[in-house]
Image: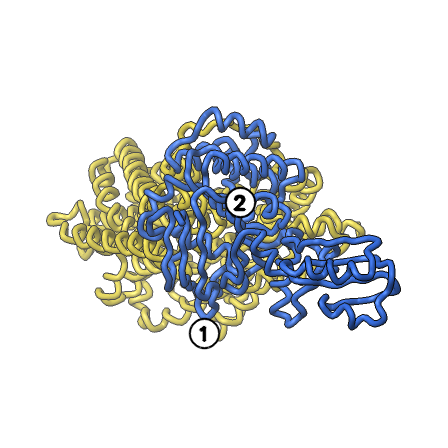
Chain colours: A yellow, B blue
Amino acid sequence: MRSRLTGARHLLHVALKQDRKNIAPWIALISVLSASSVLVYDWVFPTQQSQQILQLNITANPAMSLIFGKPVDLTTADGFNAWRAGALGAFFAGLMAIFIVVRNSRAEEDSGRAELVAAAAVGREARPLVAVAVAFMASVLLGVVSALVTIAFGGGVADSVMLSATFTASAMFFAGLGIIAAQLGSDARSASTLAVSTLGAFFVVRGYIDSSGAPDWATWLTPFGWLQETRPAVDNIWWPLLLVVGVAVVLVAVGLALHSRRDFGMGLVPPRPGPARAGAVGNVWGLALRLHRPTMVSWMVGFVVLGVLLGFLANTLTDVIAQNPTIGMILASGAVSEDDLVGEFLLTMIRILGIYAAVHGVQIVMRLHAEEAEGRADPLLGGAITRATHLASHAVIAFVSTAFGMVLAGTVMGWVADATGDTIGFGDVLGQAVATIPAVWVLVGLALAVVGAKPSKRLIGWMGVVATFALTILGPLFNLDEWVLDISPLWHVPNVGATDPAWLGLVGLAVVAVFFTTVGFVGYRRRDIA
Amino acid sequence: MDSVISVAGLVKSYGTFTALRGLDLEVARGEVHGFLGPNGAGKSTTIRVLLGLLKADAGRVEVLGGDPWRDVVELHRRLAYVPGDVSLWPGLTGGEAIDLLGNLRGGLDEKRRAYLVERFELDTTKRGRQYSKGNKQKVALVAALCSDVELLILDEPTSGLDPLMEIVFQEEIEAEKARGRSVLLSSHILSEAEALADRVSIIRDGVVVETGTLDQLRHRTRTQVRATLERPPHTVSELSLLEDAQLDGLHVRGAIEAERVGEAMALLGRYGIAALTVSPPSLEDLFLRHYGEGNGADAAPPAAAGVVETPEADAGYHGRHSPPED
């Protein structure tokens, strides 16, 4: 074994040095996610009454459980943190680990750097093992930093450590998954897609289980469920973590075994010869469609799956309300009607869809930048096309694909909701989904503006999505001022089901989307190509 | 002169780094123009300005009579470009890439495409990620050569090609020239430029330091003379006509400007010439002379020319200057 790991120490040293700046933002993001909830809790929910209202609001809106997991005890700061940062933090930790592993294994192979390394006195297993080691070290560091920061901002010691440990365990689990995906995919992009889709699927299944009133055993169907079973801030049970980490180690072993069975630079499936003539990819439009097609297909599958799940959820809502005696009491008092709860739930779900669509759109736009950075824009722009055509070939796909996704998900969700019960009608769902499209386009437009005009600032494109998510989903709970909530484009989407929908919001959104898009096109025409 | 490329006083900087500081370049219609210079001299930056990928900070740039920044589409229909570091789409086959790039120039000649694929022995059914460096280069070359254009802009087009393919490339460029095409050939491979170029421009630190036909450039450099004499001179000072004259028994070596070779022959003739070698400067000598200038070294290191590696060995060069903020 020793000789197979020769050189691992040096490689690890280099990898850590190279990857530090990529890892730091993830650790910061997740730590802030956790620390911010303990920080704001006492400030936003100072009284016992406000805390109980919070608990009720969230329990009554299963769409919240879909994202954050089942609320257990929201009447303490740590309990609130475990809910708000638990599932989401584990999700981001998993993403971090997947990206670290793929970047340090598969992407290195794609770039040819790994070939230099493989030709040196380096053992066969050293390269994948170093990638996993970097991810494991980042996982542990994430746990330590997150725990310390959360405690520093007022989190309970045991509770914060428990919660942060679930982030570490999640990152290790998905590092194991990542190293397997890195062997199966034929390049870094397909390896990431494979691993991230699996992560996303686990997350969605967990969300459905948490929000649909599924039986308790169902929690064990996903690794996120195992992590929830630690019940941070309530019971702090340690042993499920061991299970997660144990499986992570097994996954890594499988990954290493697969690694030793494949050729350098290839996936497990050998590449087949392709067509000698171009056909549909013979122009930039066809090319852009071809480049984005695999991503679009997997996202559309996601839209359908989400639509089905949310459609089913729409009808479990009434059960959830009926089963919960406290909600029943509130309803009885006449402060809120069941229709209000249903309406609020529908809005939240469509907003979630909107954010999902925006991630898809921004990803397409970012691909344009990747093409430029990898030198593939040069030969195209050296041909007889304008910069505008080149940008448009990607922009059109980003706009059309997100709109199509919203319509698709809205149709499926409306159809399932209509067919399985009478809580929500088909038209309400589809109408709301369609009305959300301009808001999604604002976020796509923002990404186009930065990628087109100032690609060095392209992170702003993603920040727009993150900010929209935070403001729209959590903002109302935190009683943020209206002008702050107004920053989110989703906040301007009219409630189609209301008696007098604020259609003017759509006009505003359209104007902003057009403005951002124009900035992108004008900027792309004027700047140097990297 | 009818120019296809005409550049005067071109300045381009990236942040605080100035890549081009007043570059002048003229490429006449129908000629193969060698564009030579060390790594980082600004060759690729110049080419990227000519293609309208970069915006000139100052100076006048004209390609085929148009402004490359403004008249992108019209100009690019009439030219083809091969980058030095070809990056193909990993999922597209070579054949698809050739068709795509050809169509972007307004269509490709089917017969020529088939001929060139055969000529360069290219497997067009492989995916971009499977190609070696040389094969990626061949894809770009075939795409450029099979479109009907007036001007070929080639940025180190043969990096990674094997010697056989290098010969094919040279033959195809000769054929292009015979058909009246103009070629701007940025190269590190001096033998290639020597074989193909009608005129060359040597660029250094963002300016063209020398331009002309090879003969003109040779005339500006000294010719090497070696002789074995029948009767030795008394002292080496009798041979002061030769620069750096060295005397070792009957063996003499030195250098002289090209137009004074006759005088040198007359001088040596007085001692009787038993054997004589007169070597005109190679492009390599010219090139090395310009390399050396920056280091304050003497301007004539021809004796070393044979052992100095040509810069072609530098495969890590990415054919472009990254802006510092990247």
Q: Which residue is mark 1?
A: A153
Query: Contact, CB < 8 Å: mark 2 with mark 1?
Result: no
**Label 1 crowding class (10 Å Cα cut-off): few <14, some 14-19, many 20+?**
some
Q: Nearer the viewer, residue A80 or A124?
A: A124
Q: In the current view of this chain or complex, which residue is farthest to the left?
A: A500
A284 relative to A424 in the view: left or right: right
Under circle 1, the secondary element is: loop
At label 2, which amino acid type do we have? Val
**Residue at the image point whose x is 53% and y is 71% from the top:** A148
Q: Which residue is mark 2?
A: B86
Q: Nearer the viewer, residue A252 or B71?
A: B71
**Residue at the image point whose x is 74% and y is 52% from the top:** A120
| Pointer 2 chain | B
Under circle 2, the secondary element is: loop
At label 1, which amino acid type do we have? Phe
Q: Nearer the viewer, residue B150 or B277?
A: B277
**Residue at the image point whose x is 45% and y is 61% from the top:** B23
